[in-house]
Image (cartoon, coloured by chain):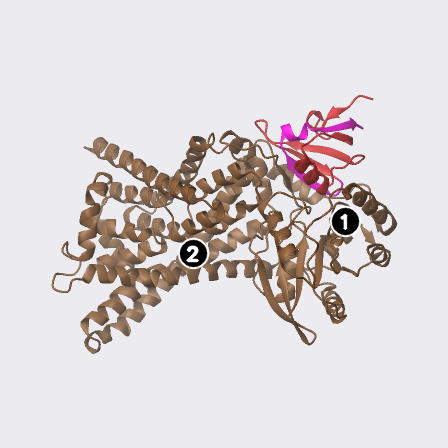
Chain colours: A brown, B red
Amino acid sequence: MRRIALLGMPNTGKSTFFNRLTGANARIGNWPGITVDLLSARILLGAEMVEIVDLPGLYDLHGFTEDEQVVRRFLLSNPVDLLCIILNATQIDQQLPLVLQLQRLGLKTLVVMNMADEAERLGIRFDTATLAAGLDCPVCLISAKYGRGFPEARKVLQQILSLNSPATTPAPRIDFAADEALVAAAEKLIARSVAIPRMLDFSLSERIDRFALHPVLGIPLFFFVLFLLFQGVYTLGGPLQDGVAWLLEQFRELILVHLHGVLPDWLYGLLVEGVYDGLGTVASFVPVIVLFFLGMALIEDSGYLPRIAFLMDALMARVGLDGRSFVMLLMGFGCNVPALMGTRVMRSRGLRLLSMLIIPFSLCSARLQVFVFLTTALFSPIQAPLVLFVLYTMSFLTALVTALLFKNRLSNSEPLLIELPPYRLPTFNQVLLRGWHEVHHFLSRATRFIVAGVVMIWLLTHLPTDVPAGSTETLAGMFGGWLEPVLRPIGIDQHMAVVLLFGFVAKEIVLGAMAVVYGLQGDALAQSMAQHMDWVQAFSFMLFTLVYTPCLSTVATLRSESKSTAFTGISIVWSLVLAWLLSFVFYQSARLLMG
Amino acid sequence: MELTRLSDLAIGQYGIIEEIEAEESFRWRLQALGFRIGREVRLIRQALFGGPLQVQVGSINVMLRRQDAASIQLRATG
């Protein structure tokens, strides 16, 4: 099979081009280097199956970030038929030296100049024929976002591949010395083939930045944007959530209960009171999660994230991190796993490890479900959002304090240089595709873990068969009994201890587990929770859930990204210790104060 | 002609890059984003509490920290 590698600097719309070419769901981000996984797809080009590989963004071939090393390693070890180099046409003067550098690898190349629409608006004009002659390779001018010029680019790809020549890997040694000459050559070529107005007009982005990056208003504005995101998610998501819960309940009442006499008791219990109730409780939160991810995708694709890095860098520098680490924390609001992988754009190992140490404290969407459920069950409608706000604040504080405590061990001195791309309005399809990709990932992960988790919990609470279900004599009761000495001081009883035990695997299980442990779902479960615990216990439970190890996937990612078992161990132990201490201090002082 | 550091430029001021005294890897990164000898740059704004600078260089806007910007020497042009 023929292979095409997509290459280019961050922020060139490489992923958008990849998506258009393959129809696959790659992540599209305005944050430099967000495309960290090696995405690939097979497509039919002409009469041939061709493999397209989307390589991480790189600034130059001798970069020192993990991403840039990935590109080098990939090219040196995988034969490639064609290098497809994506440029941001509005920045051709900056990016052309990279093209020349890549051409020195000796592979066949095609240069795709993306964002033709923006370049046109900025008044940049290209003489593509001269450019192609100068580069000695085909050059296409396209807009991957709107599809302009795309069919032609596809045709050119096909033509190049039809000229039969074997795939190659470049010579392992790359000569760096000639780079200064490349820059000069690129400038000469630009002078002949591109007309760039002396001052480019970024007035719209600059006008937005006057507010978004305002020295005083910038940070409050950022919190206001976050507030709008959450407000929007709950205003739209609340009714949807009630609707899904109602549907699931109807299905149970009208159809599933009739299976009671038909199926053996144990099977009915396992399927309906175990799997159905467990999954159903989690499923009712799906609309909220979908909306949340769509909102995150909108913010990410707009170009606002690097601005947040700009605003927060001074604060983060004081705890040994930089603005990018803060953005990773925000990404962690969705899911910690991609946020951890996002640290690959950092070169300094200390900085990267410190960022990876704090990301698991980011209150991810799975934990959010648990908190929304418990706050709704135990607090008044006015208190509930406040409690959530306190939990988000705790999420930031634990992250910052952790960084402060560990910063001397993981010192770093990495210069920070990030592009602030112009604001872009993502197309409806882009956001939808991104949102869908995230949701798909979330659901496949959630359903896998939840089904296994709730079945396990149902078994634990119902075995051995000769004792009352859910009693202290069941396996679950015994586990709870062992954990009791540790968890009683923080107000967590035997039942909830078992729930926490499974929460270690994935937080999505926590809600399902509560449904199974109490044998209830939906409103009935909420009422039962309110009878079983008071608000102090509930808050202590939520604090612990927030801080202790998020899930097995996060642990696995920590291990694979840090390549250090010791570091992963420290991360787990520290989060457990911190979780217990915080809950202990809160629970005991609340009890003391309230008598 | 006296040289100014990028970090000492006034907000809104332009300058032509004369010299870059950064360590190798950072110099390449600067180069890739358009910081080259002879290029015109402009300081757009600075974040609060000694935070990073926003600099326009050619067609790109970037942020970089004060101490890193100090490695770039300019001839201020107004």
Which amino acid, by three-letter code, is at mark 1?
Leu
Extreme-top residue of the structure? B2
* Residue placed under numbered mark 2 in the picture: A288
- Letter of the chain that mark 2 sits on in the rendering: A
Query: Mark 2 or mark 1, which is nearer to you?
Result: 1
The residue located at (62%, 48%) in the rendering is A68
Left/right of residue B78 with respect to residue A228 in the rendered view: right
The crowding category of the residue bearing disc 2, from other C-alpha atoms within 10 Å (few below 14, some 14 to 19, many at least 20), is: many
Mark 1 and mark 2 in contact (Cβ < 8 Å)? no
Q: Name the element at disc 1.
A: helix
Residue farthest bottom in this picture: A262
Q: Is residue B74 magenta?
A: yes
Asked whether residue A310 is drawn in magenta, I would say no
Q: Which amino acid type is shown beneath numbered disc 2?
A: Val
Rendered residue at 76%/47% (across/down):
A97
Residue A361 seen anywhere in this rendered image of the structure: no
